[in-house]
Image: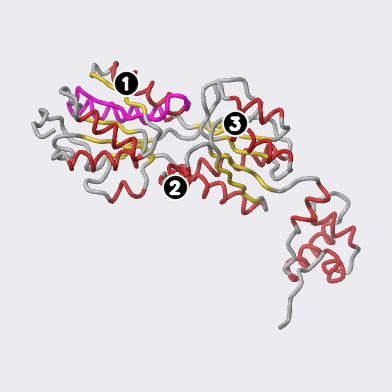
């Protein structure tokens, strides 16, 4: 069996009839190479199927050519939540084109998470990180800065940060859901929220309470860990209240889908007896029955924007803060006009 070795810079030099040094300059886009020589060298590299060696680049530059994401949630939540799958796809859309490798680590928030960041930095496994699920007074900002890593945050932290950020105003999506339900005549509306310690969970809850107050509604908020299991438990508690809500705004789609199941098992009709909205507009929500009204966000585009921001930071760019388009409410079958509470609740 013939083993085909990988083409080297020396092969490209021989094919183009120039020195290895000139090839190196041309392939790294450095000055001192005439346009004709550069075109000949690039054509030779293409003819031979030459691609850069990550190992060689790492040795010459001191970089790992890898970027990391440390997710501080349980593996069960990550496996079930389509948001992370789309986010990672968006990161890979950019990193795969730039020659970066994506390093994914899952760690328990707190000490183990800090140790994970330290390990990535000390072993030089990554050049930079994307910081997700920002928390109140997030200690990871100062930790990553002390470790000397470049970073970009998903969202604007509530502490001073030297890093770029890419944000989405999730509050706008929650406000649109509340306005939609108020227009349908709902007055008792609940919000199944994420953890208050997470900034986006807190901001969505604050947006819900503010919008409900402005609309003259009777709001209630229940915190969860964003999992379908806790979303289902929160739904049970809300529907067991003597003044049960006629509509529930969920902080993600898979909690909303779980809520639909709980309501139907209790004998309630969605949306005749209970209206339900989700968040993220995942594919599954479009095919459940009834199809889920949900706030549409683009997690894949968010991941791509974060990857580009991190690459810019790695190339020496200054910190910037980008706000993506506001999410919009997609109205489907799970919301309808308010009706008097059913005795079957």
Nearer the observer, 29 or 201:
201
Q: CA distance from mark 2 to mark 1?
A: 32 Å
Q: Residue 313: where, in percent of width, then height? A: 68, 36
Q: Residue 27: where, in percent of width, then height? A: 79, 56
Nearer the observer, 243 or 36:
243
- Circle 2 sits in a helix, a strand or a loop, which is it? helix
Q: Nearer the viewer, mark 2 or mark 3?
A: 3
Report the label total: 3
Q: Nearer the viewer, mark 2 or mark 1?
A: 2
Q: Quadrant of residue 281?
A: top left
Mark sitting earlier along the chain (1/3): 3
- The answer to whether 34 appears left or right of 65 in the picture is right
Residue 211 has which mark?
1
- The answer to whether 249 appears left or right of 244 in the picture is right
- Circle 1 sits in a helix, a strand or a loop, which is it? helix
Which residue corresponds to the image point at 23% horizontal and 40% vertical from the top-left? 262
Q: CA distance from mark 1 to mark 3?
A: 37 Å
Residues drawn in magenta:
171-199
Nearer the observer, 102 or 298:
102
**Rendered view: 190 above or below 261:** above
Residue 111 has which mark?
3
Residue 196 is covered by the magenta coloring? yes
Q: Quadrant of residue 193?
A: top left
Q: Residue 164: where, in percent of width, then height? A: 62, 31
Q: Nearer the viewer, mark 1 or mark 3?
A: 3
Residue 79 has which mark?
2
Residue lying furthest bottom in this view? 1
Residue 200 is covered by the magenta coloring? no
């Amino acid at each position: 069996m013939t083993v085909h070795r990988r083409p080297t810079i020396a092969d490209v030099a021989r094919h183009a009839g120039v020195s290895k040094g000139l090839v190196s300059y041309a392939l790294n886009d450095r000055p001192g190479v005439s346009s004709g020589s550069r075109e000949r060298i690039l054509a030779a590299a293409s003819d031979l199927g030459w691609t850069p060696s990550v190992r060689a680049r790492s040795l010459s530059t001191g970089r790992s050519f890898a970027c990391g994401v440390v997710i501080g949630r349980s593996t069960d939540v990550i496996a079930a939540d389509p948001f992370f799958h789309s986010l990672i796809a968006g990161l890979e859309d950019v990193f795969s084109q730039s020659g970066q490798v994506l390093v994914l680590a899952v760690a328990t928030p707190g000490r183990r998470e800090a140790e994970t960041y330290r390990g990535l930095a000390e072993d030089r496994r990554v050049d930079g990180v994307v910081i997700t699920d920002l928390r109140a007074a997030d200690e990871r900002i100062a930790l990553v800065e002390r470790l000397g890593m470049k970073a970009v945050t998903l969202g604007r932290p509530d502490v001073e940060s030297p890093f770029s950020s890419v944000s989405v105003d999730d509050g706008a999506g929650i406000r649109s859901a509340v306005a939609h339900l108020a227009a349908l005549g709902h007055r008792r509306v609940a919000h199944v929220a994420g953890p208050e310690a997470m900034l986006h969970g807190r901001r969505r809850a604050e947006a819900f309470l503010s919008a409900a107050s402005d609309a003259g509604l009777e709001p209630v908020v229940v915190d969860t860990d964003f999992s379908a299991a806790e979303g289902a438990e929160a739904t049970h508690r809300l529907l067991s209240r003597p003044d049960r809500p006629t509509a529930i705004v969920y902080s993600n789609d898979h909690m909303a889908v779980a809520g639909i199941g709980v309501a139907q098992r209790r004998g309630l009709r969605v949306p005749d007896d209970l209206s339900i909205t989700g968040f993220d507009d995942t594919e599954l929500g479009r095919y459940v029955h009834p199809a889920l009204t949900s706030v549409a966000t683009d997690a894949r585009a968010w991941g791509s924007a974060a990857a580009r921001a991190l690459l810019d930071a790695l190339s020496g760019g200054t910190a910037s803060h980008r706000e993506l388009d506001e999410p919009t409410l997609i109205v489907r079958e799970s919301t309808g006009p308010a009706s008097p509470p059913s005795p079957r609740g």
